[in-house]
């Protein structure tokens, strides 16, 4: 059965399955789920623990040996099987299928894997494990859910943050749950139980936000100008290449330009977006952008800005590519190109006043 991470405690209260497969690329949640399963195993009498790391086909022999052997020290054992690549291969797939078909009653198997792609999730070995036990997919926490996540953790520590404090903390740790958990612990040490206001949060919380390229495109399309510029600044500070940032924006802009031209010819928005090859998870955000910028020539001007930035990156035009990208993000997010102080200007020329 498939299980959401936040349902694990309820599930374990009813009894454990013989196999757990936890996969994803968010380290804090992976670690906490692993800790919870280990605690449950220990409390349930699985006193012996073995860890098997599989990197190549030959390593599966060690797992089979562990699974088949009798314990010398305890009647029940916890075996942690780690798949750093998320790909067991043909040999590993057959081993897991055979194990799932008849799991030993005295063994609790916990498989910790890197994020699995669609092919792996549809594989025979995955389906066998899912049928015999529990699979848990760990996803990065969406930005919109971070304040409530932080609020729950802070309240567990006796702190009651104001909405302004939550917003500020979330802004500073977005995309970095490890840092978020550390900041919760820090705040619990610094302040007594009770209300936590924005001034206290500012004084204690470091700026540990991390962003990914999709965050930039999503914020820009949704018209979140200040956040989009903040994400762009974060990507720049993390050393992400201008070429990748430009590519991320340009593919959205090309789709928007094609859709805008089709809409101008009388095609419905949904049909225009489908014809433009827009992915389903981008239809909503791109619709918002098309509502703000209805004119096809405006979208073509965005494409021209992409071309100019590309020429700057290649040294064929003067100026800094990050400047052009900042202005492009602000315009696409809905900021006025004639405004004397757009969020782009803040990003470009006043890092001390980071948004």
Image: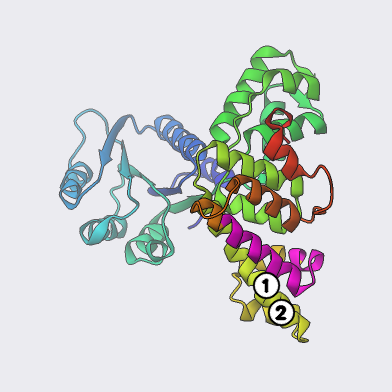
What secondary structure predominates along the stretch shown in magenta? helix
Q: Position of residue 313 (x, y in %)?
A: 52, 51
Q: Is residue 222 magenta?
A: no
Q: Nearer the viewer, residue 142 or 64?
A: 142
Q: Is residue 144 visible?
A: no
In the image, 186: left or right of 18? right
Q: Read off the residue under disc 1.
A: 257
In the image, 239: left or right of 71? right
Q: Position of residue 321 (x, y in %)?
A: 58, 48
Quadrant where the image shows the C terminus: top right
Q: Is residue 218 visible?
A: yes
Vertical position of residue 30 compared to residue 219: above or below: above
Q: Nearer the viewer, residue 54 or 350?
A: 350
Residue drawn 81% across and 31% down? 164
Vertical position of residue 229 compared to residue 310: above or below: above
Q: Is residue 292 magenta?
A: yes
């Amino acid at each position: 059965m498939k299980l959401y991470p936040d349902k694990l405690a309820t599930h374990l209260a009813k009894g454990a399955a013989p196999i757990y497969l936890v996969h994803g690329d968010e380290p804090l949640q992976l670690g906490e789920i692993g800790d919870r399963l280990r605690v449950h195993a220990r409390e349930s009498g699985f006193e012996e623990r073995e860890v098997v790391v599989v990197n190549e086909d030959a390593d599966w022999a060690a797992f089979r040996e562990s699974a088949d052997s009798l314990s010398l020290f305890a009647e029940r054992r916890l075996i942690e099987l780690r798949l750093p690549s998320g790909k067991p291969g043909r040999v590993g797939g057959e081993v897991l299928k055979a194990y799932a078909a008849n799991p030993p009653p005295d063994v609790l198997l916990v498989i910790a894997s890197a994020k699995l792609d669609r092919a792996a999730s549809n594989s025979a070995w995955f389906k066998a494990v899912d049928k015999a036990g529990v699979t848990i997919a760990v996803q990065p926490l969406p930005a919109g859910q971070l304040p409530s996540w932080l609020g729950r953790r802070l309240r567990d520590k006796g702190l009651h943050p104001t909405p302004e404090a939550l917003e500020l903390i979330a802004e500073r740790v977005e995309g970095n749950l490890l840092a978020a958990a550390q900041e919760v612990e820090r705040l619990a040490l610094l302040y007594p139980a009770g209300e936590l206001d924005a001034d206290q949060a500012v004084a204690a919380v470091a700026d540990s936000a991390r962003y990914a390229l999709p965050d930039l495109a999503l914020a820009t399309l949704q018209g979140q100008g200040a956040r989009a510029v903040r994400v762009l600044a974060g990507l720049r500070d993390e050393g992400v290449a201008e070429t990748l940032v430009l590519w991320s924006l340009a593919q959205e802009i090309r789709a928007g330009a094609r859709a805008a031209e089709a809409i101008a010819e009388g095609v419905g928005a949904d049909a225009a977006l489908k014809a433009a090859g827009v992915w389903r998870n981008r239809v909503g955000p791109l619709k918002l952008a098309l509502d703000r910028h209805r004119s096809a020539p405006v979208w073509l001007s965005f494409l021209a800005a992409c071309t100019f930035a590309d020429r700057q990156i290649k040294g064929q035009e003067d100026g800094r590519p990050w400047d052009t990208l900042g202005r492009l993000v602000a315009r696409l997010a809905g900021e006025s190109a004639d405004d004397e102080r757009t969020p782009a200007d803040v990003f470009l020329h006043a890092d001390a006043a980071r948004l």
